[in-house]
Amino acid sequence: MWTWETYERTWWNEIYGPQKLCRDLVEAGRIGGCIFFHHSSPLPWAEALRDQVQEEMQSYASDLRIVPPVDLRETGWTEQAVLEAVAPESAQEFLSAMTLSRFLDRSGALDGKLVWLYGLPEAAEPVWTERLAEFAALPGAGRCILLLEVSGKRYRRKKVRDLSADDYVRGFDVTQLCTMAVGVGRESSRHKEYLTYLCQEGAAGDPECLPALLGQRERLLEDPAAVMMEALGLGEQEAVRRVRRAQLKLLLPLLEDLRIALLEEHAADCRKLLPFRDEFGNEYHSEYEMELRHLVYYYNQGAIRLTREEWARVWTPYDARNRLMHHMKALDLSVIGPVLELAEAIQ
């Protein structure tokens, strides 16, 4: 079982997009000056990212003074409040008659420091990006590293480097993390595939949901909708919708493979029936055009003979597909499990 730390470490160190983002933030910091770091949605394991980037920056410059990341929602975002958080020794010297950018440049309040600001309200972002853009044009900016996270629009200013997590993190990154986290379990390969789809649909693009889901991996297989409701706070309708999407992605390709395999297995019986017209007026001239419902129908009519085992192999995927497509409910593991086992056996 992965711990929370395993998820965050894997996300920022082994998954391509997040790993490259972390590396590029470090490279931007090595140059120094002002950096705008944009992300349109909340960062997963953001604290771990900030800690890792700061640690790597300091490894390149041992004399760099690290200011703990400042959450502006807690400190406030007035000029005075920010100064008291990042340069308390100089805050009392700041006069409102002087612009913040010029004060920082002349006082050297940030010299040799790495300052990371986050949690700025979107409405305050235009003002603060302008302030930092003014500072970026002055010599004092080159003597420090000042990074501002923004979550509204993406700001681009002269002398300011900007990076956006939106350019790095993709849906496939979450899929890769799902696959890696699921892979450590002892389930069969088909059950792991099912778990992966459940996690992908359950997380809905948010990798931080994965620990809560996979922390109950056995129960997630048995009662996925209930786990999603409890672990993610979803309503029943939304939980069932996500489970059904996972089941459709898992089962439709498998059911098609099983249809072809079983029709080939009973090709001799099928050819005896061909050609024929079904109750909807559709004509069939090849066994590959047939559906499993035709085997079920002609078996019940006594037109073909199947052993008890053969009948079970036909009925299992037929019944599962019928329930999946027409009952509009999430399928129980008692229905899905035999399909997965049959797919394993035929494969």
Image (cartoon, rainbow, N blue to C red):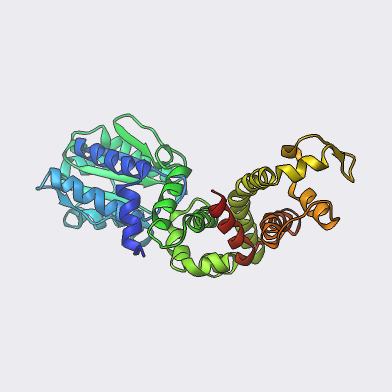
Residue 228, picture quadrant: bottom right
Q: Is residue 3 visible?
A: yes
Residue most toward the left?
A: 63
| Whole-percent x, y for residue 206 in the image | 47, 53
The foreground one among 23 and 187 is 187
Left or right placement of residue 171 versus residue 138 in this view:
right
| Whole-percent x, y for residue 87 in the image | 20, 54
Residue 271, picture quadrant: top right
The foreground one among 231 and 263 is 263
Q: Is residue 160 above or below residue 200?
A: above
The foreground one among 263 and 208 is 263
Left or right placement of residue 149 versus residue 97 in this view:
right
The foreground one among 54 and 181 is 181
| Whole-percent x, y for residue 32 in the image | 21, 38
Q: Residue at the spot x=79%, y=48% of the render?
A: 294
Work out which quarter of the rendered image holds the N terminus and state it: bottom left
Q: Residue at the spot x=58%, y=62% of the render?
A: 337
Residue 106, picture quadrant: top left
Left or right placement of residue 264 versus residue 104 in this view:
right
| Whole-percent x, y for residue 20 in the image | 32, 40
